[in-house]
Image: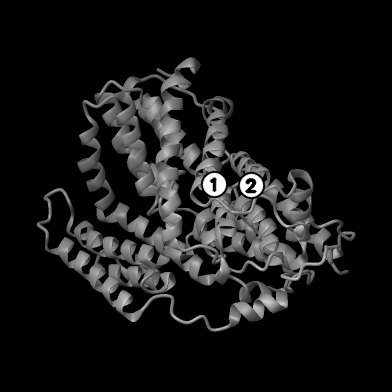
Amino acid sequence: MSNTATHAPNPDYRTPDELAVEENEPQGPTQSPKAIIIKLLIALGLGLLIIMLPRPENLPVEGHRLAAVLVPIVFLWVSEAIPIGITALLATALMIVFKVTTSSAAWAPYANRAVMFVMMIIMFGVVLNEVGLAKRLLFWILRFAGTNVKRLSFFIAFSSTLLSSIFHDATITIIMLFAILPLFKAMGITPNKSNNLSKFFVILIPLAASAGGFGTLLGGGRCPLAVDITQKFILETTGVAVKIGFLKYAIIEFPICILTAVATWAIVYAIFRPKEKELPASVKIESMPKMSSAEVGVLSVFVCAFVLWFAGDLTGWHVSVVAAMALAGFCTPGWVSFKTICDKFPWESWIVFGSGVSLGAAMLSSGLGKYLAEMLLPLLQGQSPFVTYYGMGLFGSALSSMMSNSAAVALSLPITLPMAEMMNMSVETVGLLAPMSTSFIMLVIGCPPTIIAYSTGYFNQVEFVKVAVPWCLLLLAICVLGALFYWPMLGLS
């Protein structure tokens, strides 16, 4: 059954086939050869500079070599001197060449369960689009929120943040992102002709989702991990068993999600303010036909997947296992072809995420992450509570920008918790700030939602950093102020 909706005439509207032809046309180089050469030389110079610097005694040789690889790679990622997928593969290869880690340890993270989950979640987006559910979801969003850009974007940001505190932030990103993409296509806005309107929405959604992942223990692996490490540390150092259960955690963390949702919308709107106040009437879908069998089938599988994700504690299945079952459920009845999914899958972005996980694992194994923590965090001693908490949070955000947020929590808390105790600060506060700070990242590679959004092609990394850095700094300040003024009302000293 066709999913064709009733539209007002639009002279700028192009069919998906026409847009596909346009997207496949050769676009030519995006940078001049001179600019590329200069950026490559800068990257090489950064690597040589670091490798020639004297190695500190508490920094292992492997950690020093990794720093010489990591800095130029991050520069190449941000500057996009060469395709980021190639840079990602190059980063892993260089770790092997410079003997930072073994070849098997360097490539294994590409098949990490979190990386595989991200791959399958992005495939979910292709499925949503192929069967027509993305367009149907857009219909309901526009019907509820209207076509006013401010109202619509605020509704999407607020919903993405609050829902991500319950569901996985990557899942919410896929649902919201692929619901809104048909709107740009209807307006003739393609990745190669992206403007402030498309950049605003496509960057807003993943940042809003990331801003809510800490709200409950269901939001992400970093949340229960931080609670577990904190409870264990308090018990070992004081002999007191502090219990941070589901309800207590939610009361402490969830209200701050409301503030981070509003702040995320405000800062992205300020930086990528669209000139459009209202969406054109032509994009409003007046009606939708009855759901096709493919839509009903895919939606049913989605619902079952959500139920199984919620029941993860009972089944013991990782979210990637459920995602694989869902893909089988989509493709086996023929509702969507797996070949179509593979053809339309943005493989480059997935490779970048795999490389980020590989670099994060190397930071842990090489000792570079521990060295940075031991060097930077003591600088906070003697500072005001706000500066100290903020500095610890900023360190967590910086780590999370280059590795998984769970790994950032696992690396930072064993260092920040003893510091908090020595400085007579609240250990519980430091522990519960960690899931927040590691939710805010400054690089595209930092988390699945931003990788998923980047894969659409509507923005580049420079544009992302332009908004992500001030967003991260602002939300960290909000969370620290919440810890200083709201948490003491709940009994946290």
- What colouring method underlies this structural image? one colour
Residue at left offset 49%, top offset 24%: 243
Q: Which residue does the numbered mark 1 point to in the structure image?
A: 269
Type of amino acid under label 1: Tyr
Relative to 351, say whether 207 is above or below. above
Does 393 appear above or below 23? above
Depth check, front residue: 160 or 17 = 17
Element type at marker 2? helix
Judging depth in this view, the residue of 155 and 370 nearest the camera is 155
- The type of residue carrying mark 2 is Ser
Q: Residue 175: x and y, percent?
A: 66, 54
Residue nearest the observer in this picture, 370 or 175 = 175
Residue 270, x across and y down, in percent? 51, 45
- At 74% from the left and 65% from the top, the residue drawn is 330
Check contact, mark 1 vs mark 2: CB within 8 A: yes
Q: Is mark 1 on a helix, strand or loop?
A: helix
Q: Is residue 311 visible?
A: no
Quadrant position of residue 411: top left
Percent across and percent down for residue 288 are 86, 58
Give the percent coordinates (x, y) of residue 441: 43, 48
| Mark number displayed over residue 289 | none
Residue 478 relative to residue 326: left or right: left
Residue named by callout 2: 153
**Measured Cα–Cα span from mark 1 to mark 2:** 9 Å
User: Against 7, is 267 above or below?
Assistant: above
Q: Earlier in the sequence, mark 1 or mark 2?
A: 2
Q: Is residue 144 left or right of residue 94?
A: right
Quarter occupied by the N terminus: bottom right
The C terminus is located in which quarter?
A: top left
Say left or right for 372 vs 128: left
Q: In this view, does 257 lie to the left or right of 103?
A: right
